[in-house]
Structures are given as C-alpha cells and as structure tokens.
C-alpha cells in the first residue's frame, strides 16, 4: 500500500488544469498569432543551441568572471530579433545581449536567447530560450524551450499553460516539508552570500532544494508540477517574462518577496503552486531581513 507521501510524488505534473483567475484581454486569434511568432523564433534559437553545442563557443565574460556570454547567445538573439521584427515591425524587442530596440511601442518582446549560458558553456544539459510578449505592461504570451529535452512550454493569457501541446498544471502539494524547490544565485558576491544564507534556512524546512541554473526552466518546472516552488533574489526581465505567465496560467502564484504583486521589472521573485506560498515566504524570512 502506497503512503500518502508516495502518492504525492506520483501525482506531480498532472495535466489537469486548476482554475485560473487570469482572463484574456485579447482575442484568442490575436494571442495565437503572437504565439506563432514566439514559437518560430524560439525554435530557431533552440536549433542554434543544438548546432553549436560542444563547439568553440567564443566564451567571454560580462559583469564578472562567472557571468559568461558566448557567440551563440548573440547569434540566437540576432535570429530572434530578425523573426519578430519581420512579422511585427512596429513592436520593440528587449534582449539580454542587445538591450531594447528603438521605439515606444505598446508591444514589447522580452527575450533571453540562451538562459543558462554557464551550463551551456560547460556542457551541462540544462539551458533554454525564453520569449515573452508584454502588451501595455501585461504579459500576454510566453514560450520557453528546453533545447536538451526538446520540451516546449507555452502560455497565452487566459489560454492555459502547455508542454508540447498538452495542458499542464502546478502541483497540489500543501505540505512545505514534502516540497521540492529550486533557486538560483546571482553573479555578485553580496547577492550570492545572501542567497546562500537563505538556501541554508530553507533547506531545513523542505524535502530538497535544487539549483539547476536556468530561471526560465525553473519557472516552467513549477508550472508543470515538477517542482513546488522557486525563488531568486536578483533577476532581470528576460529571465522571468515567459516563465511568470507559465506559472500563472498553470494555476500557480508568483509574487515579490513580501507577497506583493510581481512585476517583470522586479529583481526578486517567489513562485509556487499557490498552496505553499505563504509558508514559503515565511521560510525565506526575507520580509524581515531585507526590510
């Protein structure tokens, strides 16, 4: 006879959608048009990931010795920009490598061409491409592709979250002690030290904490129930744009570290299945320590 603990693990990643509070602001046809563009661009970048993997990547550094960039990051972003702007020339693109294109359009595509560059550079198989579309300040479309496992996570506001075309939902685990969480660490020393302390606190209160190295995939894994929650203390819009919509559309919760509504421009993020959100915020103890 299976224990309740075993059953909770077996039931992770269910494709049964939980009710969502999100409502569509645009017609399904309009969002699907933009989703088609996002998928085309993300798939093109993913093919470049696969093609150049293991080759001479022309690795250089940005903000620190551990903040890497490769020629593949740049090639992927160029390709993504080309596809998006060919389809929607009046839109703007914000990318990790090239910044924001000129213009003040209401439609802004937020792109991480290779999320998990350090992993990619070392041949560690956990990296992705992330593309989100923000319209009038609200995320409407999101696509994350795991280039190693050939999994594509998609979401449109009011349309649910999918993995390879099949509906996904967050886990139903309410007990923090039975949860598997994920986090990530920033490149600066002060931020690194802070999250090491948080990691140590939280690890004692949950089943396990993982640090895979791609925030976009970390959020996608919350969305499909593989993990129950995620936090990180220093992210950029391109790290979370698509993933935040995936979590929301899969029935989860995403906020700032104090439980406040989350904006894609916020550095600190906490995402969960919703059932453990308050407990996770309390376990992080950031409401006091960062006040």
Image: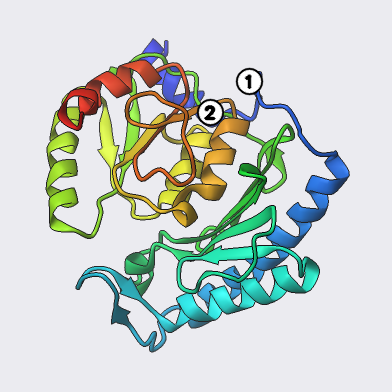
Q: What x and y, as percent, mark residue 40?
A: 72, 65
Quarter of the figure that contains the N terminus: top left
Q: Is residue 166 left or right of residue 209?
A: right
Q: Is residue 171 above or below residue 147?
A: above
Q: Are marks 1 and 2 in contact (CB under 8 Å)?
A: yes
Q: Nearer the viewer, residue 116 or 13?
A: 116
Q: Is residue 146 above or below residue 154?
A: below
Q: What x and y, as percent, mark residue 65?
A: 19, 73
Secondary element under disc 2, as helix, strand or loop, is loop
Q: Nearer the viewer, residue 73 or 93?
A: 93
Secondary element under disc 1, as helix, strand or loop, is loop
* Label of residue 97 in the image: none
Q: Is residue 206 above or below residue 58?
A: above
Using a 10 Å C-alpha cutoff, classify the residue at mark 2 as few (fewer than 14 neighbours), some (14 to 19) or many (20 or more): many
Q: Residue at x 35, y 71 (%)?
A: 123
Mark 2 or mark 1, which is nearer the start of the sequence? 1
Tag count: 2
Looking at the image, which residue sits at the far front?
104
Q: Residue at x 45, y 78 (%)?
A: 53
Quarter of the figure that contains the C terminus: top left
Q: What x and y, as percent, mark residue 95?
A: 52, 66
Q: Which residue is mark 2?
A: 170
Q: What x and y, as percent, mark residue 187?
A: 23, 60
* Label of residue 18 in the image: 1
Inspect this view and state whether residue 213 appears. yes
């Amino acid at each position: 006879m299976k224990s309740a603990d075993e059953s909770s693990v077996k039931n992770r990643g269910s494709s049964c959608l939980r009710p969502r509070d999100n409502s569509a602001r645009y017609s399904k046809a309009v969002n699907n048009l933009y989703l088609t563009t996002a998928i085309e661009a993300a798939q093109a970048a993913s093919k470049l990931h696969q093609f150049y993997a293991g080759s001479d990547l022309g690795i250089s550094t940005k903000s620190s010795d551990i903040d890497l960039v490769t020629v593949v990051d740049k090639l992927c972003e160029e390709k993504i920009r080309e596809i998006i702007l060919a389809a929607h020339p009046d839109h703007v693109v914000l990318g990790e490598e090239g910044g924001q294109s000129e213009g003040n359009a209401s439609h802004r595509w937020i792109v991480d061409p290779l999320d998990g560059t350090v992993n990619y550079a070392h041949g560690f198989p956990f990296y992705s491409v992330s593309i989100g579309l923000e319209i009038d300040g609200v995320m409407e479309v999101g696509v994350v592709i795991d280039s190693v496992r050939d999994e594509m996570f998609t979401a449109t506001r009011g349309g649910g979250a999918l993995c390879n075309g099949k509906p996904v939902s967050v886990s139903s685990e309410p007990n923090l002690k039975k949860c598997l969480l994920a986090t990530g660490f920033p490149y600066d020393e002060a931020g690194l030290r802070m999250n090491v302390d948080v990691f140590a606190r939280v690890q004692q209160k949950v089943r396990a904490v993982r640090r895979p190295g791609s925030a976009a995939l970390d959020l996608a894994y919350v969305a499909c129930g593989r993990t129950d929650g995620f936090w990180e203390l220093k992210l950029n819009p391109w790290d979370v744009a698509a993933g935040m919509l995936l979590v929301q559309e899969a029935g989860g919760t995403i906020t700032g570290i104090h439980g406040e509504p989350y904006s894609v421009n916020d550095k600190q993020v906490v995402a969960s299945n919703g059932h453990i959100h308050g407990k996770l915020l309390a376990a992080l103890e950031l409401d006091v320590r960062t006040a």
